[in-house]
Amino acid sequence: MIQLPLSKLSNVGTTIFSQMTQLANENEAINLSQGFPDFLPDSELLNHVDHFIKKGFNQYAPMPGMIALKEQIAAKIEHSHQAVYHPDSEITVTAGGTQAIFTTIASFIKKDDEVIIFEPAYDCYEPTVELFGGIVKRFEMKAPDYEIDWNAVKNLVTDKTRMIIINNPNNPAGKVLKENDILELIKIVKETPILILSDEVYENIVFDGKEHLSVCKYPELKERSIMVASFGKLFHVTGWKIGYCAAPENLTHEFRKVHQFNVFSVNTPIQLALAEYMKNPDHYHYLNQFFQEKRDFLRQGLSNTSFELLDCEGTYFQALRYDKISDKNDLDFARELTISHKVASVPFSSFYKNKRDEKVIRLCFAKKQETLERAIENLAKL
Ligand SMILES: Cc1ncc(COP(=O)(O)O)c(C=O)c1O
């Protein structure tokens, strides 16, 4: 029997999100593992999609995206961060944040290039870097505060460092970068050719009046950054898989060379619908408050339990430390929680290469009130 070749990611299994979702379904558990809302998007947005499909906008969009949408994106960025991107040459519509991340790495990372990431890290960074022959250097942020020691990060930089990937607000830690973090990052990259891939898919979900500090606010970072965003997170439509990246013209030019062969272009009627819907900025301005209420509801409901509620400054994820409840490792604990207590979560160890276990799990609170109530009721019994 001839042994056919394995894929370049043959050592990688299915993601923890799929595993926990499957376990949740098998056990009829409340699924707070995967990051998606269980409520409907705004019907106004759905009506726009319906309208454009029926009007006949069903063929390929231009490769970089529909200009109507790119103009709205540029306006949103300028309004939110006082940064200017040219809609035609500096904004590209992508098939979700994931494809923007994949294409950025595919465009710029060659064999033996080093890429610095921060753990706990969203799952797609590392395998994508490795797929293109890059080498991942990691800084581990630790419970309970997940602060970054920038001196340690600086020590990771070599003359092979090609890119630093930041995720702000951070999934899963719910951390938001402070001005000092940004200034330290600037110090590290200035006068180097290091690129920044800035995953900002939760940029509109930041709490307690804190400001989201996008890389594009800082000229020293903007000139070297590819900023990634997701409409899935912005408008509760994760299944539509549509997002964008904003980057200076020279970087966008290179990005599109790969993008054109990666997806070529993205869903036409949905782009037009989003462009229409974004004309009213209220459609995303309410998000901070909306998710803050959900966060507070969950935290309040769990405040009398033995779970330790770690800070949640942004994203729709709450981290819980359970060391007063069990000494099981976090994967076993998350499984037990799903099977015996009918609440599915994600163990933090899955966001670390070395499976660092600090007895912390992640709950997604982008859920209906009644879903959160049922989950709180089950968790309160522990
Ligand atoms: C940090 C982070 N980056 C990127 C993505 C991917 O975004 P999309 O669903 O638009 O591909 C997600 C989705 O959960 C995420 O949490």
Image (spheres, rainbow, N blue to C red):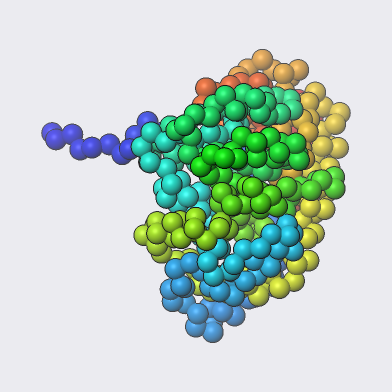
Residue at screen point 85% across, 31% down: 303
Instruction: Return the residue found at the far front.
Output: 191
Residue at screen point 73% across, 57% down: 81
Place residue 120 in its image quadrant.
top right
| Position of residue 12 measured from the top left corner of the image (x, y, whole percent) | 41, 33
Camera-nearest residue between 298 and 58: 58
Q: Does residue 204 lie above or below 264 as drawn?
A: above
Q: Does residue 267 lie above or below 141 as drawn?
A: below
Place residue 71 in its image quadrant.
bottom right
- Residue 175 appears in the figure: no
Quadrant of the frame with the C terminus: top right
- Residue 368 appears in the figure: yes
How many numbered marks, from 0 up? 0
Residue at screen point 75% across, 71% down: 280
Camera-nearest residue between 310 and 226: 226
Place residue 242 in its image quadrant.
bottom right
Going by the image, does 380 lie left or right of 225?
right
Quadrant of the frame with the N terminus: top left
Camera-nearest residue between 310 and 126: 126
Instruction: Return the residue found at the far top.
Output: 327
Residue at screen point 71% across, 33% down: 319
Going by the image, does 264 lie left or right of 18?
left
| Position of residue 305 measured from the top left corner of the image (x, y, whole percent) | 82, 27
| Position of residue 294 measured from the top left corner of the image (x, y, whole percent) | 79, 47
Going by the image, does 251 lie left or right of 37?
left
